[in-house]
Amino acid sequence: MSDAFSPWTLYLPFATKVYVYGFTNAAYQQRIRVTFENGTVQTLTGQGEGNRATSPASFDYTTPSTGSHLNGYQVVVDISYSKDGSTWTASQVAGAGCSLGWTAATYLVASEDWIDVDWNDAVVQFLWYNPPPVRNAALSARKKLLEGG
């Protein structure tokens, strides 16, 4: 993995509803801060092993149709941990994504809080669906035919 410290930057597709989920697998408290290009910040916190959901467990965000970057809508993920809830230390982070053709894509950012090197202490998942325009056009044509048009 990486020895990079928080934060991690990724780019989401424009004009897309993105679902964001947070999980913890750590004894220490975990804090995930997701900062969108427009300055909107969403914080997820949690503690515990076994892919325990953060609080909040999830949220969704619709990216605008344009942004400041050609490669997508910028999102910065900052992950930190705390032994006592008052002092926060930046975690190591790494991220990667994959897609299922034009239909669905996911991007994960995982962290390591310097304790057991398992790289799952806090994990945030971005998930989105984008049916290709051709599919949407085909569905519209089929619907029109079924309706007698």
Image: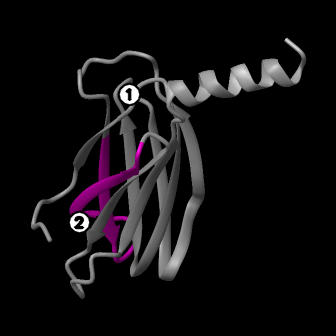
Q: Quadrant of residue 58?
A: bottom right
Q: Secondary structure at mark 2?
A: loop
Extreme-top residue of the structure: 149
Mark 2, residue position: 91
Mark 2 and mark 1: span between their CA atoms? 22 Å
- Amino acid found under the numbered disc labelled 2: Ser
Query: Would you say 121 lies left or right of 136 here?
Result: left
Q: Nearer the viewer, residue 141 or 37?
A: 141
Query: In the picture provided, is 43 more to the left or to the right than 53?
Result: left
Image position, residue 139 (x, y; %): 68, 28
Q: Earlier in the sequence, mark 2 or mark 1?
A: 1
Q: Is residue 27 above or below residue 98?
A: below
Question: Disc 1 designates what residue?
Answer: 39
Residue 148, given in percent of the width and then of the height, sits at 90, 16
Kindly state the secondary structure of the residue where label 1 is placed: loop
Q: Find the residue positioned furthest to the bottom.
A: 116
Q: Quadrant location of residue 111? A: bottom left
The one nearer the camera, 26 or 19, is: 19
Tell me whether the residue at label 2 lies in contact with that at label 1, contact meaning CB atoms closer than 8 angstroms. Answer: no
User: 17 left or right of 106?
Assistant: right
Relative to residue 111, is residue 49 depicted above or below? below
Residue at image point 29% right, 52% down? 78
Q: Residue at x 15, y 59 (%)?
A: 5
Q: Which residues are magenta?
A: 76-101
Q: Is residue 85 visible?
A: no
Residue type at mark 1 is: Gly
**The stretch drawn in magenta includes residue 108:** no
Residue at (57% x, 30% y) in the render: 135
Label 2 packing within 10 angstroms: few (<14), some (14-19), many (20+): many
Residue 134 percent across, percent down from the top left: 52, 25
Check if residue 88 falls in the magenta segment: yes
